[in-house]
Amino acid sequence: MEFSHVSVMAKEVMDALCPERGGVYVDCTAGGGGHSFEIAKRLPASSRLVSFDQDDEAIAACKERLAAFADRVTVVKTNFCNLAAALDSLGIERIDGAMWDLGVSSHQLDDGERGFSYLKEAPLDMRMDRTAQKTAYDVVNGYDEAELVRILRDWGEERFASRIASRICVRRAERPIETTTELAAIVTEAIPAAARRAEAQNPARRSFQAIRIEVNGELDAIAPSVEAAVERMNPGGRLAVITFHSLEDRIVKDTFRTLATGCTCPPEFPVCVCGGKPKIRLLSKKPILPGKEELEENPRSHSAKLRTAERV
């Protein structure tokens, strides 16, 4: 399947990053190379872009798309949680910009074989890195009921987490749950009919989101990656993070707030004793949202939020 992914808010991201200034930039979630391409074509020839992704299909597509900029682009297969180690391996000490386009890509959703979509029948996989061991099958059939409730509630913000986890456990006691459509049907059946009728979207979407996040450890990597990038960043360097659901956005918002505050003393302390100093300056207090034209052209941009900051 040809790799396809529409880069969300590409103009807004480039306006924030200002890659035409030059230096070393990192695209932590290269995907098919959409944002990387926009960065690379703006970089001066003496500058450098490092693009990370953990999906082999994305890596191949990114390399092909960026072939014209091979003199200034390095594509690395890794999870962005390994940002510091990856830069060390390339001999890069300081950077001037970094971006993240979080969540699942359009290509991963559209490729029925990958198991990300509740609309297409496929084995329960959901791995972004297909060499990783843990799959959605392992989570659905191997986690105990309490663990299932936890991830459905915490990662999916699913108010019927207990009902869904119970129904999964009952069904898998009969035989393993093996496909996406089978799981989607179980989830849907567990949700009360009145709640299903009130849903604007497929009632299985929150559960699939939760299981995908658990399989890939998506949320755990965000804050450490942003913090590592800030530590490596030259003064005046820029950060841009695109999120697609409230859990991601809350982590980015809180991480940015902490880095922009510096001081960790309790509010009741009359003076700062920790000595912490702000490391970033927020470029906008509220997230940037897609424009009307982009919303019309790319329905998947509707939930996107962009947060930006500058290293001080």
Image (tube, grey):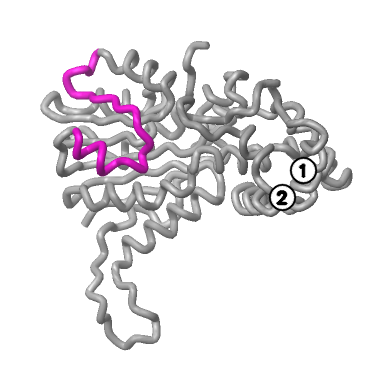
Q: Residues within 10 Å of mark 1 (few under 14, many from 20)?
A: some
Q: Amino acid at mark 1?
A: Cys
Q: Which residue is mark 2?
A: 145
Mark sitting earlier along the chain (1/2):
2
Quadrant occupied by the C terminus = bottom left
Q: Using the image as rendered, state which of residue 286 and residue 211 is in the foreground.
A: 211
Q: Residue 50, which numbered label? A: none
> Is 215 in front, or is 120?
215
Residue at x 44%, y 19% (from the top left corner): 57
Q: Which residues are magenta?
A: 68-89
Quadrant of res 93 = top left
Residue 300 x/y as whole percent: 57, 31
Per the image, the residue denoted by label 1 is 169
Amino acid at dot 2? Glu
Image marks 1 and 2: residues in contact by CB distance under 8 Å: yes
Residue 114 on image: x %, y %: 58, 23
